[in-house]
Structures are given as structure tokens and as C-alpha cells.
Image: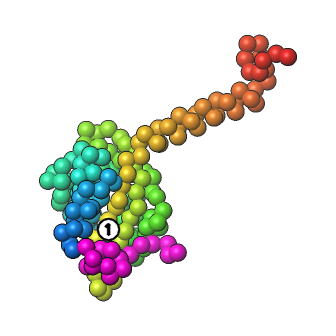
Amino acid sequence: MPDHATTRADDPAGRGDRTLGRGSWESLVQCLADAVLVTDRDGSITYWNDAAERVFGWSAAEALGRSLDLIIPERLRERHWQGYRHVVETGVTRYGDRLLEVPALRRDGEPCSIAFTVTVLTDAAGRVERLVAVIRDDTTRWQDRRRLEAELRELRDRISTPDRPGEGAAPR
């Protein structure tokens, strides 16, 4: 299995599959439950589906043409753009078949957690034209996981702490 996903921009199915016309592909992507963002080489948003609006709060009209900084917390932008430039230069991403989980921002400034994959779209010469991210709002799962990890730490602490009256294991 390759460590990246690269697809020709003129072959959205990635297999020469032309059974769905261009309009059908666009309709499919527009109504997916997951957010789909497409960006150009510079990181400007060129496509934003309905789910992206639900996840981030920005309409397509507001998001199109803007930088991905729209949804990236300021403290993570430098690291994000280093990785983005690397993918544009090499055409390789580790996140074609592996989820990347990161914090993001909603329109109202509220943080959220997202999980996504990245597909690289190239032209016929192999030059990166666009990056496509398929994004899921992972906020609830992330919060649940943090809560469960805190509960587990608390239970481990109770077990490892010697019994004190009124705490820990019941007297025998």
C-alpha cells in the first residue's frame, strides 16, 4: 500500500472510471455527510461542500477564495503551512489513507476537533494542482476520549494509592 494518495485531476475516481458524469460527481461530493474542501497550490479554498458549512459555519460563498487559515488555529498555522508546502512540492502525503486528527476553528471562534484524509490531485505531467481534504467533525468523540482517559487515570491513581480511611478499597 503506498504511503500517499495521488489522483489525476481529470480522473476523480482515480481509476479511469467515467461511469458518472462530471455533474454527478459534483452532486455526490456536494451532498456527502463529510466536509470536502479543495484547495489550490497556494492553499486558497476552491471548493467547499454543504457539510463544510455545517462543520465550520462558513458558507461556500464566504469560504471560496480564502486561505485555509480560516479554519486553522493561529498557534498551528506555521506547522500547517510547512506540511502543506512539503506536500505541494513532493506530491506525497502520509494522510491519504491515514486519519490526521487536529484542532480547527469554527466561524464563531469556537474550537472543534477534526479528523481528515488528504488526496493530492495532479495534472498530466504529475505536477500538484489541488489538495482535497475529506473532513469529519470529531469533536464529540475527542471530548469523550479525553473524559474516559481522565477517568482511567483517576481509577489508576486510586488503585496505586495505599488505602486510607474512607478511600480506596473497602476494608476487609
Circle 1 packing at 10 Å, graded few (<14), some (14-19), many (20+), is many
Residue found 29% across the figure and 85% down from its top: 124
Whether 151 is drawn above or below 42: the answer is: above
Q: Quadrant of residue 17?
A: bottom left
Residue found 35% across the figure and 77% down from its top: 14
Q: Nearer the viewer, residue 110 or 31?
A: 31
Q: Secondary structure at mark 1?
A: strand
Residue found 25% across the figure and 56% down from its top: 31
Quadrant that contains the C terminus: top right
The furthest residue to the front: 19
Residue 72 in the magenta stretch? The answer is no
What coloring was used for the rendering? rainbow
Q: How many marks?
A: 1
What secondary structure characterizes most of the magenta part?
Answer: loop
The furthest residue to the left: 61
Viewer can see residue 103: no
The residue that mark 1 highlights is 131
Q: Which residues are magenta?
A: 1-20
- Left or right, 149 with respect to 83, comes to right
- Left or right, 43 with respect to 15, comes to left
The furthest residue to the right: 172
- Left or right, 1 with respect to 134, comes to right
Residue 5 place in picture, x, y as percent:
42, 72
Q: Quadrant of residue 16?
A: bottom left
Residue 97 place in picture, x, y as percent:
46, 66
Viewer can see residue 80: yes
Please state which amino acid type lies under the numbered disc 1: Leu
- Left or right, 162 with respect to 138, comes to right
Whether 79 is drawn above or below 92: the answer is: above
Residue found 18% across the figure and 69% down from its top: 23
Residue 77 place in picture, x, y as percent:
35, 54
